[in-house]
Amino acid sequence: VWIMLDGVDIYCEDDAAIIVDQADKVFLTLAEGSENYVETGSEYSDEALEDNTNAAIFSHDDLTINGSGSLTVSTSYRHGIVSKDDLVITGGTISVTVPEDGLKANDYLKIANADITIDAGDDGIHSDTDFYIESGTLLISECYEGIEAITIEIAGGDITIYPSDDGLNANGGSSDTFGMGGGMGGGMGGGPRGQEQ
């Protein structure tokens, strides 16, 4: 499935503004020069909750975001962009403001050639398996943990993170594990999780 956003402003009060119920793969393309806005309310409907929908953009299957336009995502309910499978972002200027996780994937999460800014109440980026960034710019201006995944691979890119806890956590997310981070932007400090850096 291919969806192109070319100057859209989508608001949904009680569900995801964009939802993928079933597809092999979905490509969400940001048209060149376009400005696109996606926003949802603070409480989702019973139907949405029964479907486990918990983000402004939510996909049950593989989701790829590409193109060269901009996308602003904001919600007062939980997460920004979620894929229950792989989430791949290979272009665009993307801004996400959310109370919990900014970008979230059950499987692989990859970023390349994108300019991403995240303001999150919990994890800036969360993958239940692997996170990989190849290139682009990533600014996580506010978060509890910056990037959390089983494995984190940074092959390139300009990354700045301002966490209240771990900058990078590649230990599976257990509350008593050790992380890399602390109160710094873009760097890594040692020490136990929660320890003053």
Image (spheres, helix red, strand yellow):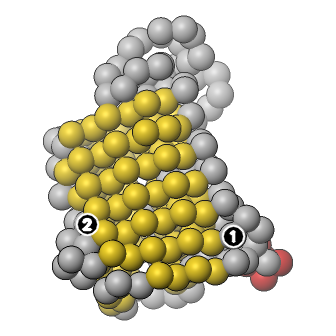
Is 117 displayed left or right of 177 in the figure? left
Q: Residue at x 32, y 34 (%)?
A: 160
Q: Residue at x 52, y 20 (%)?
A: 178
Is 71 in front, or is 182?
71
Q: Which residue is mark 1?
A: 41
Is 11 in front, or is 84?
11
Count of number-bearing discs: 2
Is 131 in front, or is 19?
19
Q: Is residue 149 visible?
A: no
Amino acid carrying label 1: it is: Gly
Q: Is residue 26 visible?
A: yes
Q: Which residue is mark 2?
A: 92
Name above or below for residue 2 compared with residue 143. Answer: below
Name above or below for residue 40 compared with residue 150. Answer: below
Mark 2 surroundings: few (<14), some (14-19) or many (≥20) residues within 10 A: many
Q: Secondary structure at mark 1?
A: loop
Q: Residue at x 38, y 14 (%)?
A: 189
